[in-house]
Amino acid sequence: MKFDVTVIGSGPGGYVAAIRCAQLGLKTAIIEKYATLGGTCLNVGCIPSKALLDSSEHYHNATHTFEKHGIDVKEVKVNMKQMIKRKNEVVSQTSGGIDFLMKKNKITVFHGHGSFVNKNTISIAKADGTTETVETDKTIIATGSKPIAPAAFNYDKKRVITSTEALNIDKVPKRMVVIGAGVIGLELGSVYARLGTEVEVVEFMDRAIAGMDKDCSKELTRSLKKLGIKFHLGHAVTEVKGTSRSVTVKAKSKKNDKEIILKADYCLIAIGRYAYTDKLGLENVGINTDKKGRIEVGKHLETSVPGIYAVGDVIKGAMLAHKAEEEGTLVAEVIAGQQPHIDYNLIPGVVYTWPEVAAVGKTEEQLKEAGVPYKVGKFPMRALGRARASMDTDGMVKMLAHKDTDEILGVHMVGPRVADMIAEAVAVMEFRGSAEDVARMSHAHPTYTEATREAALAATGNRAIHM
Ligand code: FAD
Ligand code: NAI
């Protein structure tokens, strides 16, 4: 079997690359080691976590806000088995959709572990013990990432878990310790806090979502504390021990070395993910990796071996599905002789808590550090009629624009549905628009998007109308 392009890995980086290659007339194959397509994102990441976030949000509203809305419901109960079942249905429908897209685009799918024999030969070890080999002109590596679980944390998949197991707990835990106040820790921590679990988050840095704008971090932490999540910031976890029924987590304060000991039913490790290249045979072709084990890529995401490219979580950059998709598309178009381009500054980041957090461009801290002159416009959600109508008044929109040119440099949002709202900021920034441009665009009333316009008005000289 000979292909123009073979893609290893069927996550959003891999399957999108394969579809784009096929669209461009290349004979394409994709290799996936698991039985289902879609990678981390579809099977144990974006989609199942959002399914549980939605279900738990419904429960939280039924128990916390319905009464205020004038809806009396008696005996609202969580049926965890059904919640997980629905989540699994969403996953299998979505993964089935990728099967359909592979057929539609005439992409040959192989299930098995792919590894390089040489630059143009990939062997596929199948679940039944047999091996198949494909010949390929070009290869795109899209093997993704796995959760980091240090030895001292005694990851046992039962009581000491990562996001993968946290998506399949069949009884609401009484207590959960989450290590890491990053995206996974706060999203999955929210799921369980909404369902009634006492959640305690231990974070090494002095604030949650430390990579995002400080104001977002503050707003979100305040909302999550209201939800009942306890934070131990500035603490490094040193040891986790699980028994068959419980876990003990030890952490030390960075300030004074004081130790805290937490006990819970589960400990969720959410301290980042590492690039996955296990048994990929990189040594057989001489592909370089960096200190973090990520595949090194140069111009057009080509590895140190000409004709072999890498995309998504397995290379440097944000570990996001839409970043992987952009890269998959870029490589396919490069192989087909086109001249594509990615502006990494304009890849938005979202945290699907409630309120949600969404951001694009530079944070205020980054602008300060780079010495870029900027102005700030902020507008709180609670000043919006739409937010009061839905009782979702937590959050704000913050716009950062260049002091002299008014070009928008960063937009940071906390609030209801800001994951969808951030698209406006991306679009305007893609066209290098100014705060004045957004201030002069009509935004439907009443919508949450009015906060973006008001923040733009605030940035262009304190002209916000409703504040
Ligand atoms: P992956 O999706 O990891 O896919 C890699 C695939 O390659 C896997 O299927 C793997 O089995 C396969 N593979 C590996 N090695 C081989 C081999 N040798 N042979 C054959 N197959 C192989 N991102 C967002 O943008 N939004 C979100 O809301 C979001 N939520 C997330 C929630 C959770 C709980 C997690 C864990 C992640 C989330 N992410 C989210 C991150 C997102 O899932 C990843 O950034 C994305 O999946 C990366 O895509 P990828 O194609 O690079 O790799
Ligand atoms: P993360 O990098 O977002 O957060 C990890 C946190 O753990 C950091 O704040 C870090 O300071 C902390 N930490 C590390 N070691 C620690 C220790 N020993 N003790 C205490 N705290 C410690 O990583 P996370 O949440 O695991 O997510 C992994 C990746 O998955 C992210 O890069 C993210 O991009 C992606 N993802 C994206 C989502 C989205 O787009 N909505 C949702 C979920 C995951």
Image (tube, rainbow, N blue to C red):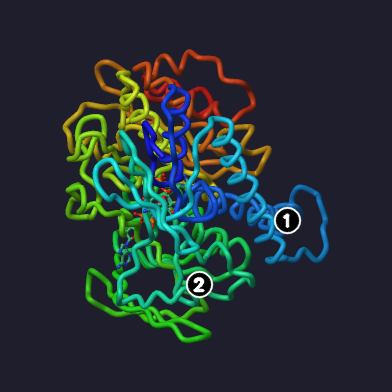
The label number, if any, that marks residue 176 in the structure image: 2
Image coordinates of residue 340 in percent, x first then y, are 32, 21
Tell me how far mark 1 sits from mark 2, CA to CA. 22 Å
Answer yes or no: is residue 356 visible.
Answer: yes
Q: Do the residues under discs 1 and 2 have CB atoms within 8 angstroms?
A: no
Q: Amino acid at mark 2?
A: Met
Disc 1 marks which residue? 62
Secondary structure of the residue carrying tag 1 is helix
Query: In the visual, does 78 lie left or right of 326?
Result: right
Secondary structure of the residue carrying tag 2 is strand
Q: Residue at x 26, y 22 (%)?
A: 403
Q: Residue at x 39, y 34 (%)?
A: 3
Query: In the visual, does 41 lie left or right of 337?
Result: right
Task: Name the quarter where the N terminus is drawn.
Answer: top left
Other-residue count near label 1 (Cα within 10 Å), few / some / many at <14 / 14–19 / ≥20: some
Image coordinates of residue 185 in percent, x first then y, are 44, 59
Q: Residue at x 46, y 86 (%)?
A: 243
Query: In the visual, does 267 lie left or right of 339?
Result: right
Residue 298, quarter of picture: top left
Please tell me whether residue 239 is drawn above or below residue 73 in the rendered image.
Answer: below
- Of 462 and 204, nearer the camera is 204
Image coordinates of residue 145 in percent, x first then y, are 36, 53
Q: Amino acid at mark 1?
A: Ala
- Of 103 and 93, nearer the camera is 103
Please tell me whether residue 341 is drawn above or below residue 46 in the rendered image.
Answer: above
Other-residue count near label 2 (Cα within 10 Å), few / some / many at <14 / 14–19 / ≥20: many
Image coordinates of residue 20 in percent, x first then y, are 44, 28
**Eye-nearest disc, 1 or 2:** 2
Q: Residue at x 27, y 15 (%)?
A: 405
- Of 96 and 379, nearer the camera is 96
- Of 387 and 234, nearer the camera is 234
